[in-house]
Image (cartoon, rainbow, N blue to C red):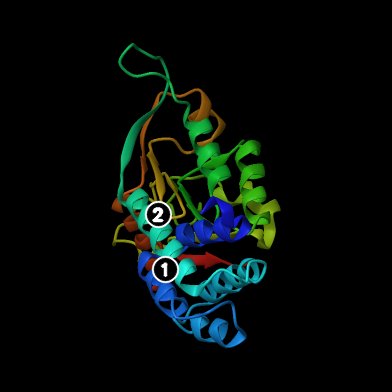
Amino acid sequence: MNNLGPLADQIEILATRLPAAQVAMLATAIEPLIGPTPAGRANAAQSAPTTAFKGEVAELWDAWLARPEVSGASVALALRAAGGTAERLRTAQSMDIVWTGPSSIHVPVRMSGQVLLDLIDGARTELTVVSFAAYRVPEVRSSLQAAAARGVDVRLVLETAKDSGGRLRQDAANTFATLGAEVSLWYWPEESRPEGGAAMHVKAAIADSHIALVTSANLTGAALEHNMELGLVVTGGSVPRRLAEHFRALMTNGVLRRILD
């Protein structure tokens, strides 16, 4: 596909962004076309009823219009090939230890803070970060702001002093107040918790349903750089996707609520 230039690049991008089933539906719609006709574009955009899908079709068509001599059958073949490769990469899973503290020959140090920053900086579409406490993390705040600026849907799930039952002295969300509407802030309200109270003690970050960091480290300077902290980072496979879907479901059904100014 390299000789197709920007069209090939757009096919590869589309295949990584869209689910395999949607890539397959788009390929089926495009295959009979002689070229990038307006009617073909309208029909292809109806293959899946989502705004994201229609946006990807529009970008693909713009790239295809620069190479109108390429047939629909060729574009469809490239889509299927790229989609198959993307799906195999998504389902392949790797796991590594994230450790902050004294190292040994068995476990090298992978600072929790750096792993988190790499995950945030690599996010392209959606990012969920969860923490009990948060303070003194200017680099994390800057990375989150940069992610939001490039169009990433950034969601922070944080504990509040009120809902923590006295376990937390100040709202974790205060650390990210300067980000304003660029990110959405979420919390677990006291009335949704078990009788007798419970802490929102999760520490995790999930990017693009593809990579997940689960760690003992809060979003604090000490935890990310100096404490003895342990976590796992999972890339690919079903675990990051299931975690992302789990938090989306908690937000949709009201277990987690958005903090509104």
Q: Position of residue 37 (x, y in %)?
A: 60, 82
Residue 112 placement (x, y as % from top left):
47, 31
C-alpha gap between disc 1 and disc 2: 10 Å
Residue at the top extreme of this rendering: 105
Relative vertical location of residue 168 with respect to residue 52 in this rendering, above or below: above
Asked which secondary structure carries label 2, the reply is helix
**CB atoms of marks 1 and 2 within 8 Å:** yes
Instruction: Count residues near mark 1 (Cα–Cα under 10 Å), then give few for <14, some for 14-19, many for 20+.
Output: many
Q: What residue does disc 2 label?
A: 86
Image quadrant containing the C terminus: bottom right
Frontmost residue, 178 versus 66: 66
Q: Is residue 48 left or right of residue 170?
A: left
Q: In the rendered structure, which amino acid carries the disc numbered 1?
A: Val
Q: Residues within 10 Å of mark 2 (few under 14, many from 20)?
A: many
Q: Position of residue 50 (x, y in %)?
A: 49, 78
Mark 1 element type:
helix
Quadrant of residue 181 within the rendered picture: bottom right
Residue at 68% of width from left, 55% of height from top? 149
Residue drawn 46% across the image and 54% down it: 208
Q: Which mark is residue 23?
A: 1
> In the figure, 181 relative to 138: above or below?
below
Q: Is residue 66 visible?
A: yes
